[in-house]
Image: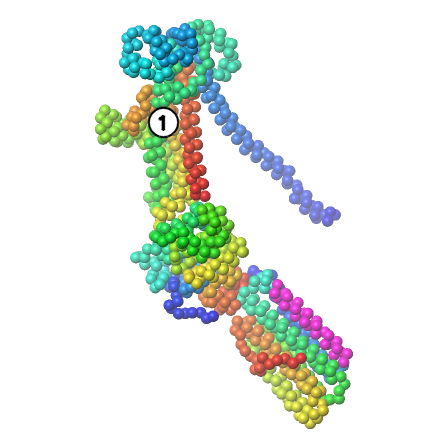
């Protein structure tokens, strides 16, 4: 079969995307864990290490541009490469969310507040789980699985709403801590946005497989991101 | 962009067209409506009958003694293979540009004037030559030596001269059979730009085996392939943007991603 | 790298065949070169024998030695002096007869000289020695001539000269000229070309551009033409005799045009026969030339809405013309040298009047050359050689003219 070169290079590219994905997963889980432990040193390291994710993303982007320029992919190949460009952007943004969480840790220092660590960890693990399976669906080009994963976004939204109400109540009860709890609110928000972005990845997966662009995201995608 | 299915926009239409060379069916059951003032690309693997179909559109197949057709080709609703139709007239209205630039071994001026003259052009010949050369984006390069032999031009210039020559006969449709396959990339791009400009006034059908070219230069793309019996058939026809990003047929997909065969 | 054993063997493998290949190449080159040399040697030998014979030392016996006629060489005498000479040396009757034919005082210098030679000097060639013989053994020749022909003078003579070209045929070897034959040949070729060229090119156009090659009758025509090209020329002579000389006698003799006492053995019959002879070759050559016109040119023309005839007339023929002309040259060259069919159709071997029209009796160069070579006298070898030179030169001239014509055409259309 012709186009062995292109096929091989696309496989290599997908491996790199999975690697980037696992970096993001790792960063997200660590960020929440570090917040629970209030480990400022680890938080600082995590904050710095976001650069590695950015670098990886640019490396992949460059590889895709070279592939497009040299191999002139068409149809499915073209959709795959274009979608991958989008997906690595999403992943890099997710990395930024983890970095944002580390920043919150650094700003909270050892402030004496009651962080809903267990709920945040559940959110994080749910989002990371979605991301992991979403990337698998992407690599396997499984539109059904992708659609199913996009549906799970609701779970994260529910957790977010729960944390949101809890934090609002806490802030009303104790206005002096509004600043700190607002920071915590961003953590939950970032995790919620992360799940949204997994949904975007799933949309791309369906696009690659079918050529159709479906809007799966239930929340307002245009909302600005807080970092 | 959406595919226009407006009947009035169809300038030439193949209905259930099958073309035979002797008993060999080279092309079968093609239904293809070419839209006015659009560039339509015909792509497909070698030997799938692209040129055969193209030549059927202006009855150049008449010169192959064994060639005959089933089905109809309607030009403005008139069957061009009807017995009362003069093929010479058809070829005046549907011009052709060939794979290898084939200017006449005469001067640049004569190359253009000849076709107009035999078709009874009575107007100002100098004007016609200038206008067509300008339309073919060649005027500036040759205006100072119109008496020079056309064979002294570069390949790309020769091909543009051939296009100008076709324009001088005032056709409605221009058929191009792999017009750039003998040209270098820059000359190729020049021809593609030229096609775009010409599509304002003419309808263009281009056969190409260069998919990038079809993608770059055409509005609509028809993909042909071969059956087990080696007969060519049209698999898919649609907006170029759709064919090259979201082809509907697996065979189209395999071909344009280069995973054919 | 150098120590890499693999690289070393690779290098040996690459280099090992080279000297052998060079050797083989040299051998082939030598073979082809010797083929060329053999051809060249043959050509030079041919030219040499012809040239050698065209110039010779002739033992001439004069009835009256020209040196005794006048104190000055004859060429330097004035017309009046020449007329006086004639009057002095001829009988009254003879002189008057000549004067009545054309007044002597009004004749040209050359004419008068000829008269003196013919009537007074009356030279006779007794023996002839070619240039090479002379150079090799001039002493022996002198001795031999002095012994055998004591009255003869040994003179150098260039057989190919101006007089040879413009004099008519004559029974006297020293006065013979080739004009009648040359004119006959030219007339013949003119008729041949006039007939064969349009017919041949027309047939070629039909066969290449119009004929459906799958049709049995077209295939038969083509096969016939191909085979006719190889038919011996004598067969064409017989054909010409049967058709043109006999069957079409009223036409070819000019009887239809009021030429009462003629028969069909005219220059027209011969020209038509020659046309027939070269027609197959001409058709085949023209077909080749037409076939060599790239199809893309025809397509370009048709693509512009040109008709078949417009395409052929404006593109195919101009493009094929150089090739057609080359083919015609080759065919006509063959016709110029043909003897056999002319003899059969009835070329005269002795005729002194120039052809005046298509219904004339005629002779032709090769006929005369053939005729001369069959004569027993030695001097006729020399005359034949001179005739061959004239034939060769006219052939070359014709070819050169055609090549010039062809080049003009190729320049115009390239
Ligand atoms: N003049 C001809 N005579 C017989 N068969 C032909 C002729 N031209 C093309 N074909 C056959 O028709 C088929 C389609 O040819 P063509 O139209 O030239 O294909 P394409 O242009 O797509 O490469 C091929 O199988 C080819 O062999
Ligand atoms: Mg083709």
Q: Residue drawn at (41%, 6%), measured in percent from left and top?
A: C68
Magenta segment, prevailing SS (helix, strand or loop): helix
Residue A63 among magenta residues: yes
CB of residue at label 1: within 8 Å of ligand 1? no
Q: Is the N terminus of chain A in the top left, top right, bottom left or bottom right quadrant?
A: bottom right
Task: State the residue in front, C261 or C40.
Answer: C261
Q: Chain of mark 1?
A: C
Q: Quadrant of residue C199?
A: top left
Q: Is the C terminus of chain A in the top left, top right, bottom left or bottom right quadrant?
A: bottom right
Q: Is residue C2 visible to the viewer in this orientation of the structure?
A: yes
Q: Which residues are magenta?
A: A40-66
Name of the residue lying farthest toward the bottom: A173
**Residue B120 vertical position relative to residue C362 in the rendered view, above or below:** below
Q: Is residue C250 visible to the viewer in this orientation of the structure?
A: no
Quick one: SS at disc 1?
helix
Give residue B222's position: percent from left, percent from top.
45, 63
**Residue A145 vertical position relative to residue B123 in the rendered view, above or below:** below
Q: Which residue is mark 1?
A: C185
Q: Quadrant of residue C234?
A: top left
Q: Residue drawn at (68%, 45%), measured in percent from left and top?
A: C11
**Residue B163 vertical position relative to residue C267 in the rendered view, above or below:** below
Residue C298 among magenta residues: no
**Residue B220 vertical position relative to residue C189 in the rendered view, above or below:** below
Q: Residue drawn at (49%, 60%), measured in percent from left and top?
A: B193
Give residue B77's position: percent from left, percent from top.
34, 64
Give residue C32's position: percent from left, percent from top.
54, 33
Judge from the rendering whether residue B84 lies leftward or rightward of residue C43; answer left or right.
Answer: left
């Amino acid at each position: 079969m012709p186009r062995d070169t292109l096929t091989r290079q696309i496989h290599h590219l997908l491996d790199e995307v999975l690697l980037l994905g696992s970096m993001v997963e790792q960063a997200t889980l660590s960020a929440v864990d570090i917040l629970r432990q209030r480990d400022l040193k680890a938080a600082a390291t995590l904050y710095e290490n976001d650069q590695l994710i950015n670098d990886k993303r640019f490396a992949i982007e460059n590889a895709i541009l070279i592939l497009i320029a040299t191999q002139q992919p068409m149809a499915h190949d073209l959709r795959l490469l274009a979608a991958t460009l989008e997906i690595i952007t999403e992943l890099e943004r997710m990395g930024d969310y983890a970095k944002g969480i580390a920043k919150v840790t650094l700003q909270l220092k050892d402030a004496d507040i009651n962080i809903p660590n267990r709920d945040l960890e559940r959110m994080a693990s749910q989002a990371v789980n979605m991301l992991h399976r979403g990337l698998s669906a992407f690599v396997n080009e499984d539109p059904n699985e992708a659609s199913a994963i996009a549906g799970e976004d609701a779970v994260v939204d529910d957790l977010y709403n729960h944390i949101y109400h809890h934090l609002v109540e806490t802030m009303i009860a104790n206005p002096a801590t509004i600043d700190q709890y607002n920071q915590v609110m961003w953590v939950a928000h970032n995790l919620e946005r992360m799940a949204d972005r997994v949904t975007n990845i799933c949309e791309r997966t369906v696009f690659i497989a079918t050529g159709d662009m479906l809007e799966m995201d239930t929340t307002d995608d245009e909302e600005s991101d807080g970092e | 962009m959406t595919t226009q299915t407006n009947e009035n926009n169809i300038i030439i239409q193949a209905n259930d067209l099958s073309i035979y060379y002797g008993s060999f069916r080279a092309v079968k059951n093609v239904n293809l409506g070419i839209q006015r003032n659009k560039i339509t690309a015909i792509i497909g693997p070698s030997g799938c009958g692209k040129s055969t179909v193209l030549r059927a559109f202006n009855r150049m197949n008449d010169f192959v003694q064994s060639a005959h057709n089933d089905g109809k080709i309607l030009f403005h609703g008139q069957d061009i293979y009807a017995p009362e139709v003069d093929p010479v007239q058809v070829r005046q209205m549907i011009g052709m540009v060939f794979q290898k630039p084939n200017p006449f071994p005469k001067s640049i001026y004569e190359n253009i004037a000849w076709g107009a003259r035999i078709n009874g052009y009575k107007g100002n010949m100098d004007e016609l030559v200038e206008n067509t050369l300008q339309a073919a984006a060649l005027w500036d390069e040759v205006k100072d030596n119109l008496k020079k032999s056309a064979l002294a031009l570069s390949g790309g210039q020769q091909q543009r001269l051939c296009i100008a020559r076709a324009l001088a006969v005032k056709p409605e449709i221009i058929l191009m059979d792999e017009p750039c396959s003998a040209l270098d990339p820059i000359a190729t791009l020049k021809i593609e730009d030229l096609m775009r400009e010409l599509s304002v006034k003419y309808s263009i059908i281009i056969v190409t085996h260069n998919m990038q070219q079809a993608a770059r230069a055409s509005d609509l793309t028809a993909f042909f392939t071969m059956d087990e019996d080696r007969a060519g058939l049209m698999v898919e026809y649609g907006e170029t943007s759709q064919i090259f990003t979201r082809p509907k047929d697996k065979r189209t997909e395999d071909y344009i991603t280069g995973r054919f065969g | 790298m150098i120590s890499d054993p693999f690289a070393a063997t690779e290098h040996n493998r690459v280099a090992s065949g080279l000297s052998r290949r060079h050797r083989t190449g040299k051998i082939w080159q030598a073979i082809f070169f010797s083929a060329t040399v053999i051809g060249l040697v043959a050509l030079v030998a041919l030219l040499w024998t012809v040239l050698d014979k065209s110039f010779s030392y002739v033992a001439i016996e004069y009835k009256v030695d020209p040196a005794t006629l006048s104190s000055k060489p004859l060429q330097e005498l004035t017309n009046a002096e020449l007329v006086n000479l004639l009057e002095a040396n001829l009988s009254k009757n003879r002189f008057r007869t000549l004067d009545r034919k054309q007044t002597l005082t009004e004749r040209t210098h050359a004419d008068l000289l000829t008269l003196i030679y013919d009537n007074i000097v009356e030279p006779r060639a007794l023996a002839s020695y070619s240039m090479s013989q002379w150079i090799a053994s001039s002493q022996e020749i002198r001795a031999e001539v002095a012994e055998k022909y004591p009255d003869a003078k040994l003179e150098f003579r260039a057989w190919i000269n101006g007089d040879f070209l413009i004099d008519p045929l004559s029974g006297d070897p020293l006065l013979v000229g080739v004009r009648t034959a040359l004119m006959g040949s030219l007339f013949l070729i003119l008729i041949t070309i006039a007939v064969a060229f349009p017919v041949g090119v027309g047939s070629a156009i039909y066969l290449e551009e119009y004929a459906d090659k799958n049709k049995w009758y077209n295939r038969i025509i083509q096969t016939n033409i191909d085979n006719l090209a190889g038919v011996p020329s004598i067969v064409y002579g017989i054909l010409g005799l049967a058709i043109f000389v006999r069957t079409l006698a009223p036409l070819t003799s000019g009887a239809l045009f009021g030429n009462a006492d003629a028969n069909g053995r005219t220059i027209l019959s011969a020209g038509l026969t020659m046309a027939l002879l070269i027609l197959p070759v001409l058709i085949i050559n023209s077909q080749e030339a037409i076939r060599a016109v790239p199809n893309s040119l025809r397509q370009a023309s048709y693509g512009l809405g040109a008709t078949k005839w417009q395409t052929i007339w404006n593109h195919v023929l101009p493009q094929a013309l150089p090739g057609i002309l080359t083919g015609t040259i080759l065919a006509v060259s063959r016709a110029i040298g043909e003897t056999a069919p002319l003899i059969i159709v009835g070329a005269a071997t002795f005729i002194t009047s120039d052809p005046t029209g298509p219904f004339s009796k005629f002779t032709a160069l090769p006929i005369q050359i053939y005729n001369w070579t069959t004569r027993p006298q030695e001097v006729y070898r020399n005359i034949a050689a001179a005739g061959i030179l004239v034939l060769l030169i006219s052939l070359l001239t014709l070819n050169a003219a055609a090549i010039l014509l062809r080049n003009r055409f190729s320049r115009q259309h390239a």
